[in-house]
């Protein structure tokens, strides 16, 4: 299969129909959305196409970026652009093949192809995910599974290398808020101009696409690490930590176990060996947020997929970045908020929550992104941080006092995550209302800011007290100590007024609205 010319990408069109397209057709006006049999495949396909555009079709500057956003390329335009890369995007041949090891030795393990799926990575995952008896994949699903594994590769034991971003990284992509935005717009929002990347020229294509050369192995005394300076920075989009090659000896015809396609060419096994490319040092990926060491002594630490499942509590770090760089927003997101600000967008966050090789969960969420004028962005960020700090404090106090009402010795009791989560879910609408109001504020009027803070504090206070009553009164009546319950509720009400994180907000409210906490 030729990935650059064959029609293998499933796309939902403007009329609602689902039809396959070739990669050269991603600029068509009626192509709205990629469709994949699994959500992790869909996320990987977006990264694949963004990486391809960043590698072969990156704009020189912001003006060219805007021109191409408004005027998508034709199929002929992209065919010409991708022509030099055709040989690198073959799925099967005797030479270089897409994201597969060029020099894999003969004495390697042969594994069923479904073991490429990340949620099949441990015995406990396999207990809940029973593999199909007929375990072959069509060429399209094999490509997506291979891509997903290389981009997200978790730890798998000694010598089994993780992805360039570590196991189970979080990916954050900008998507238009407009409901009928085209696929091209969704992709192009995440492509950076060359002057923003400031990359050196590409000397050899294998420095970007590692499968075009023998693997930089890391499994013996002659093995080597791969820091950013040893190859081209664009390899971040095409990292290949796992040594994998499809096994052509067991190809057959049948139904795909993943997408259900009938009577197709199937790949049933792949060959693999430990000791793939070991990405070390200060690698960063433009689509992932990172936490930075305050002393600059440790390499950047990628944020993991579980952060996509924490609701609004990580909004500031993922969208604008925290002042302490814990974390910084992804490079693509930082560039958009600093240089563009338009069109109206959301942030699509997704990734696996991994425990070593065990997939705990796949998270997939959308966060709002607000365009804020550069001259007020610092004040906006500071205000959002104060609101988030107060939310963290209220969630913690609710958890503490519910345990105090439930247990005679609450310090000996374990965590009750459902209690905390109920606050984050229940306060989400109120937070996004505050966010919307703050984004429109010029911060010249302290009284307007005070009104926003007051509405937030009052809404969350009512919520916390209501949740306390819900959790405490839903317990068995015979086990309830009413004296303990009354004291815990009184302590909760007091802490909601005097908590350390609430004080800055109440101070502004009291100064400008003459309202006592």
Image (cartoon, rainbow, N blue to C red):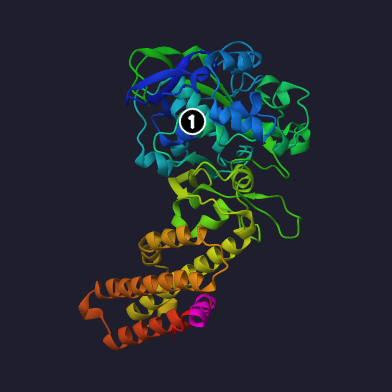
Q: Position of residue 384 (x, y in %)?
A: 53, 63
Q: Can residue 399 be found in the magenta stretch?
A: no
Q: Can residue 503 be found in the magenta stretch?
A: yes
Q: Quadrant of the C terminus?
A: bottom left
Q: Main secondary structure of the magenta part?
A: helix
User: Looking at the picture, does residue 29 appear above or below residue 180?
Assistant: above
Is residue 85 shown left or right of residue 451? right
Is residue 389 shown left or right of residue 105? left
User: How many residues crowd around disc 1 within 10 Å: few (fewer than 14), some, or many (20 or more)?
Assistant: many
Q: Position of residue 218 (x, y in %)?
A: 71, 34
Q: Is residue 275 visible?
A: no
User: Looking at the picture, does residue 49 appear above or below residue 399?
Assistant: above
* Nearer to us in this view, 334 or 437: 437
Q: Which residue is mark 1?
A: 116
Q: Image quarter for residue 4? A: top right
User: Looking at the picture, does residue 326 appear above or below residue 191?
Assistant: below
User: Looking at the picture, does residue 184 appear above or below residue 460?
Assistant: above
Total residue callouts: 1
Q: Position of residue 303 (x, y in %)?
A: 58, 50
Q: Quick one: SS at disc 1?
A: helix
Q: Residue at 72% across / 60% down in the picture?
A: 294
In the displayed image of the protein, which residue is found farthest to the left?
A: 478
Q: Position of residue 225 (x, y in %)?
A: 74, 37
Q: Residue at 55% across / 36% down in the picture?
A: 189
Span colored in magenta = 502-512
* Nearer to us in this view, 65 or 43: 65
Q: Is residue 444 visible?
A: yes
């Amino acid at each position: 299969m030729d990935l650059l010319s064959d029609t293998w990408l499933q796309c939902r069109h403007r009329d609602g129909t689902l039809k396959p397209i070739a990669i050269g057709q991603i600029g068509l006006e009626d192509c709205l959305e990629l469709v994949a049999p699994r959500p992790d495949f869909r996320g990987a396909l977006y990264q694949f196409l963004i990486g391809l555009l960043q590698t072969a079709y990156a704009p020189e500057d912001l003006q060219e970026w805007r021109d191409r956003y408004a005027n998508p390329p034709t199929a002929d335009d992209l065919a010409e652009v991708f022509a030099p890369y055709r040989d690198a995007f073959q799925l099967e041949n005797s030479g270089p093949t897409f994201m597969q090891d060029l020099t894999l030795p003969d004495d390697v393990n042969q594994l069923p192809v479904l073991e490429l799926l990340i949620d099949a990575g441990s015995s406990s995952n396999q207990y809940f995910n029973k593999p199909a008896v007929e375990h072959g994949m069509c060429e399209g699903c094999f490509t997506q599974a291979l891509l997903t594994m290389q981009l997200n590769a978790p730890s798998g034991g000694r010598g089994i290398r993780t992805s360039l971003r570590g196991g189970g990284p979080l990916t954050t992509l900008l998507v238009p808020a407009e409901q009928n935005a085209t696929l091209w717009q969704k992709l192009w929002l995440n492509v950076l101009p060359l002057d923003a990347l400031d990359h050196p020229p590409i000397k050899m294509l294998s420095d970007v696409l590692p499968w075009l050369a023998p693997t930089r192995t890391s499994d013996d005394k002659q093995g080597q690490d791969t820091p950013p300076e040893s190859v081209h920075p664009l390899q971040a989009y095409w990292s290949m930590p796992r040594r994998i090659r499809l096994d052509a000896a067991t190809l057959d015809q049948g139904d795909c176990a993943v997408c259900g396609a009938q009577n197709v060419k199937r790949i049933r096994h792949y060959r693999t060996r430990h000791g793939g490319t070991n990405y070390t040092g200060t690698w960063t990926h433009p689509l992932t947020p990172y936490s930075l060491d305050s002393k600059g002594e440790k390499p950047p630490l990628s944020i993991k997929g579980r952060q996509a499942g924490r609701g609004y509590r990580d909004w500031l770090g993922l969208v604008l970045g925290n002042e302490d760089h814990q974390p910084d927003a992804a490079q693509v997101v930082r560039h958009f908020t600093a240089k563009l600000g338009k069109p109206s967008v959301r942030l699509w966050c997704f990734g696996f929550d991994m425990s070593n090789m065990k997939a705990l969960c796949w998270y997939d969420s959308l966060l709002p992104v607000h365009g804020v004028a550069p001259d007020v962005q610092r004040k906006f960020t500071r205000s959002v941080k104060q609101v988030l700090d107060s939310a963290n404090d209220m969630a913690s106090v609710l958890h503490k006092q519910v345990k105090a009402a439930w247990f005679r010795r609450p310090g000996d009791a374990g965590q009750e995550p459902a209690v905390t989560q109920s606050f984050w879910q229940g306060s989400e609408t109120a937070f996004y209302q505050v966010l919307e109001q703050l984004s429109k504020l010029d911060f010249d009027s302290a009284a307007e800011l005070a009104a926003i803070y007051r509405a937030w504090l009052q809404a969350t206070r009512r919520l916390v007290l209501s949740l306390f009553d819900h959790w405490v009164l839903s317990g068995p009546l015979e086990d309830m100590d009413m004296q303990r319950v009354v004291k815990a509720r009184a302590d909760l009400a007091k802490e909601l007024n005097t908590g350390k994180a609430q004080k800055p907000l109440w101070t502004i409210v009291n100064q400008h609205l003459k309202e006592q906490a």
